Amino acid sequence: MPQIEVRGLAKTFRVAERLPGLAGAFRGLFHRRMRDVHALGGIDFDIERGELVGYIGPNGAGKSTTIKILAGILNPTAGTSRVDGLTPWRDRRRHVARIGVVFGQRTQLWWDLPVIESFDLLRDIYRIPAEAYRDNRDRLIALMDLEPLLDVPVRQLSLGQRMRSDLAAALLHGPSLLFLDEPTIGLDAVSKLAIRDFVRELNRDRQVTVLLTTHDMDDIEALCQRVMVIGNGRILVDGSVAALRRRVRNERVLVVDYDSAGEAGRVDAEGEGVRLVERDASRVRIAFDPDRIPAATLIGALLAQGTPHDLFIEHPPIEQTVAELYAEHDMRER
Amino acid sequence: MNSAALLFRYLAISLRGQLQYRASFLMAALGNLLNCLIELAGIWVLFDRFGNLSGWSFAEVAFFCGTINATYAIGELLATGFDQFGMLYVKTGDFDRLLLRPRSTVLQLAGHELSLRRLGRLLPGIVIVVAAWTALDLPLEADRVALLAFAMAGGVAFFFALMVLQATMCFWTTESLELMNILTYGGVETASYPLPIYHRLFRRFFTFVVPLACIGYFPIVAVLGVDDPLGTSRMFQVAAPLAGFAFLGVAIGVWHLGARRYTSTGS
């Protein structure tokens, strides 16, 4: 049985339409036009125990709404969901005791408390048995390198330090399911890598199921075997990262370096499934469709024309893939 | 850890936090103290001019005033999380954070802060009660003291309930409405004077709708050992503070309705 089961999940918000200007604001006091916003239009998916799933989409697509519903803090308008056999929004307290949630934008810790005291308080809130708590705490402190931060009040932590503490805090009670909502937002490269390594190990070594939302496609490429793309409240793609790429455009880029710009300038690279993307001094970038022309054939043709000193094949960045997917479905921020 | 122990943990943490900002705490406590003394001075001026208040002596009215101030202070002390709920939790979306923890939201908010500056109202309140008790020459009997404690406990529940209701409104209005101050600050002011001086409609309102008199006037009449000019029985006066607890039960029920609304609108 899947750990998370979602069927026909829909959420409609009723929002009051704001009229422009001060006069409009006064008019709004007496007469309000309500408008329905369909944040989720009936989505379905399953997530198996131990999966690490990326959940992406433009702002306002319904990512956070989904996470909030699955975390039990928002009721859906329609549809069902079972997480470990519980309906999250009906059994809120039992449900949240078994999951971990981290919001990148907002800390779950106590602003004025030193990190270690926040942890101790969480032990009491989650009723973590003393021994399990000690083990988990010490392991997380070591993994996330928190030792030097333990006595620092949370408000004095840098964003990266805070994020590491937040992640540790969300795992003290040993949840088997972790929701990460933009965990790398605003972090520097080193912190991002630390978070990614940690999440990867957590998933691999402890079989913690992870549902990760992010705008950073490097997170997705580094971590996720599976990715779901949501737009306008619907799941557009659900599959592997490779499948996501194929879904939009099956194209790779061959980068070829020559010794001189003159040599690069003589290269002819037009034909069936091939097009020249860019000529930049002694470097040439050629896009090709591997289904229509195998890489070996293309390289052979190039070698017949001259002798490059280096060449390599690039995937198009996943950002581009996703941007094209969004464009295809005409998604704009709402 | 059970709920009561967790509540104490929360409150101990809050206390330590406040003691770090000593000056701020002292100023706020001093402000509350002055507020309370000015109120009492107002009553004294009244008596200085008119001698008595439809048969009630200054010491008796001071007793009402001191008790209700001390009661309100304890209620406010415990309900600070609810008092500041709109600003701190709804506007910022931080209520989500409480919902993500496997504990009742009422417990978590009660543990939000034990606001020490409320001591500025509690201490003078107690001093006034003790002084009035002495001035009235009331015998120091266990059942009299127990009844006063019971009345105050019911009163704490009553004021706590008002704060919970005030916080509940934030689910609809986002910001906490000053409307409730009519019942909190206004309630303290009102209950500082004996109930019979008010119009019949007010008396009914404060007995049956918002049971302020049930935790103030009625039990205190029994503590003072005087006959109620309104003709209520001793039994009623002694049992009246129960209304404070019932009122709290209703308020918590309404709170859960509000919280359910929050989880279906997400704001």
Image (cartoon, rainbow, N blue to C red):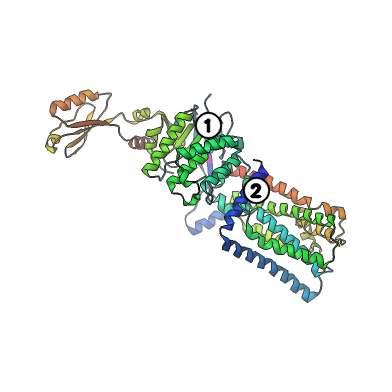
Task: Provide the chain ID for the residue under circle 1.
Answer: A
Residue B5's quadrant in the figure? top right
Q: What amino acid is found at the position of numbered circle 1 in the picture?
A: Ser
From the viewer's perspective, tell me whether residue B259 is left or right of residue A298: right
The residue indicated by pointer 2 is B8
Q: Residue at x 77, y 64 (%)?
A: B130
Residue A214's quadrant in the figure? top left
Task: Provide the chain ID for the residue under circle 2.
Answer: B
- B256 or A272: which is nearer to us? B256
Q: Residue at x 81, y 66 (%)?
A: B134
Residue A294: image x %, image y %? 24, 23
Q: Element at badge 2? A: helix
Q: Element at badge 1? A: loop
From the viewer's perspective, tell me whether residue A176 is left or right of residue B154: left
Give the quarter of the figure containing the C terminus of chain A. Answer: top left
Mark 1 burial class by Cα count in 10 Å: few <14, some 14-19, many 20+? some
The residue indicated by pointer 1 is A176
Residue A31 seen from this side: no
Q: Quick check: is A296 in the magenta stretch?
A: no
Q: Residue at x 18, y 30 (%)?
A: A269
> Which numbered circle lies on residue B38?
none
Q: So how many labels did they put on this image?
A: 2
Q: Look at the image and give the residue range highlighted in magenta.
A: A8-12
